[in-house]
Image (cartoon, rainbow, N blue to C red):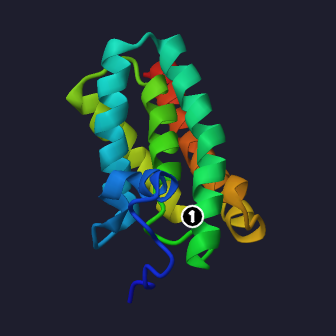
Amino acid sequence: MRKKLIGLNLTNPIHFCAVGFGSGLLSPAPGTWGSLAGLFIGGGLLSVLSAQGFLLFTLLSFVLGCYFCGKTAKDMGVHDHGSIVWDEFVGIFLVLLAIPSLTWGWCIIAFLLFRFFDILKPYPIRYFDQKLHNGFGIMIDDVLAAGYSILLIVLYRILG
């Protein structure tokens, strides 16, 4: 059963961003919906920005996300509530930067790899997810999941 959305105020722009503009309120699997929304937003931005511009945007999104997610989690009284998906946005943005082309095939691969590692949480992702109870902690596990995804994409590109 999903935890209640006590303390969430969608008229608060910080909360609205933290829940991925509402995508994190979809169920089941709000993290998957948030990742999908992030895929479309990131793909759209990457199609109009340079890779360097999108990387800068992603880094800024990470910094802002530490605040958005931490503040929203505190206001809700729940660390990393499932509806908080800004971290999924940043994770999928990072993986999009690693794909060789912005095609449907590569976007699907990026999405599936990211979701796999975000759900599985191999070491050290689970460790940080359990130990860091602040906005940075909410964000870093998705950055690490993106790192695993990027590693596989790079290995495929080198060996493939």
Q: Residue furthest bottom?
A: 1
Q: Position of residue 85 (x, y in %)?
A: 46, 56
Query: Circle 1 — which element?
Result: helix
Residue beneath the point at 33% across and 39% down: 39
Q: Residues within 10 Å of mark 1 (few under 14, many from 20)?
A: many
Location of residue 127 with respect to 101 vertically, above or below: below
Q: Position of residue 77 (x, y in %)?
A: 61, 79
Q: Is residue 14 visible?
A: yes
Q: Which residue is mark 1?
A: 72
Task: Tell me where residue 106 sits by quadrant.
Answer: top left
Q: Is residue 122 visible?
A: no
Residue beneath the point at 39% across and 63% down: 10
Judged left or right of residue 65, residue 133 is right
Q: Position of residue 30 (x, y in %)?
A: 36, 65
Q: Residue furthest right?
A: 131
- Quadrant, the N terminus: bottom left
Judged left or right of residue 77, residue 17 is left
Q: Amino acid at mark 1?
A: Thr
Residue beneath the point at 33% across and 14% down: 48
Task: Tell me where residue 130 sits by quadrant.
Answer: bottom right
Near-viewer residue (64 or 52): 64
Location of residue 27 with respect to 110 vertically, above or below: below
- Quadrant, the C terminus: top left
Q: Position of residue 142 (x, y in %)?
A: 57, 51
